Amino acid sequence: MKHRINGLSLNVLESGSGSLTLIFLHYFGGSALEWQAVMSQLSGQYRCLAIDLRGHGDSDAPATGYSVDTMADDVLAVIDLLHVQEFSLVGHSMSGKVALAVAARRPAGLRSLVLVSPSPPLPEPIPDDERQKLLTRHGKRSSAEKTLKNITEAPVSEAVREQIIADDLRTAKPAWDAWLLAGSKEDISERMSAIDRPVHIIVGAEDRALPPEVQHRMVLPYLKNASFDIIENAGHLLPWEVPDKLITFIQKKIS
């Protein structure tokens, strides 16, 4: 369903019910659809919301306005509009950084964070040549296919493969460029001391986009109440690659 948020139409998937709401946020170049398999199994216990962040999926794509804080504003506006009370944020990659920005504001009702291969609160260590390739080749299927190969390790079905490629290709160029040129480079590390809720981080052992060592070096040292887990034989797209293992992790950490 689409909702009017901060002057934009944002697409939000919703299922289930419960006293605790799980709010799912997707990776750069992805969409809320990556959470469908996870939501289908958790919606029997929890209210589940998955947001297409601005410029991604089926949400509007303004020409400007893609800072980490602007995306955090959108998430908080969805929480307010949909009358969410108690909630946990589940952020993946790019939106892990967004979730950290939200948590640093200490919103009422936030219980915990689950971060899947999160982008660090420091500038993300994307090599300059890789950043330039992503900027110049966006919108080309060959580039999307190469990205898919790089960010997955566990096999996925042909249908999932096509959805990952489609989400990459439909990401609006303003959102794509803004993350690579600005959002990923933002430093919000000084705010991390304000986070007073448990943070649970999980990453694929074969993640080549944000390897486990990035979490040890650039994320965990800035969080005072964080746990860290690794899923073997998995890459960067855990919700697509190993949804059952991720579901088990989420259930364990938020129970």
Image (tube, helix red, strand yellow):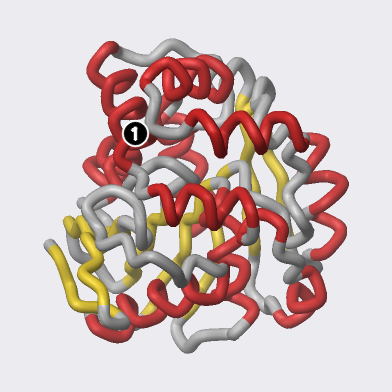
Q: Which residue is mark 1?
A: 169
Give the percent coordinates (x, y) of residue 168: 38, 34
**Other-residue count near label 1 (Cα within 10 Å), few / some / many at <14 / 14–19 / ≥20:** many
Residue 211 visible = yes
Vertical placement of residue 159 versus 111, above or below: above
Quadrant containing the N terminus is bottom left
Q: Measuring 60% from the left and 72% from the top, which residue is drawn there?
A: 101
| Of residues 11 and 175, the one drawn nearer to the viewer in this rendering | 175
SS assignment at label 1? helix
Vertical placement of residue 92 versus 158, above or below: below
In the orientation shown, which residue stands out farthest toward the front?
136
Kind of residue at disc 1: Leu
Among the 4 quarters of the image, the one containing residue 179: bottom right
Vertical placement of residue 210 versus 108, above or below: above
Give the percent coordinates (x, y) of residue 18: 24, 67
Position of 50 compared to 123: left or right? left
Residue 255 visible = no
Q: Measuring 61% from the left and 60% from the top, which residue is drawn there?
A: 183
Position of 154 compared to 19: left or right? right
Give the percent coordinates (x, y) of residue 234: 57, 21
Among the 4 quarters of the image, the one containing residue 75: bottom left
Q: Measuring 26% from the left and 81% from the top, which residue is drawn there?
A: 7
Q: Measuring 41% from the left and 48% from the top, which residue is drawn there?
A: 173
Vertical placement of residue 210 versus 190, above or below: above
| Of residues 172 and 82, the one drawn nearer to the viewer in this rendering | 172
| Of residues 163 and 104, the one drawn nearer to the viewer in this rendering | 163
Give the percent coordinates (x, y) of residue 64: 44, 69
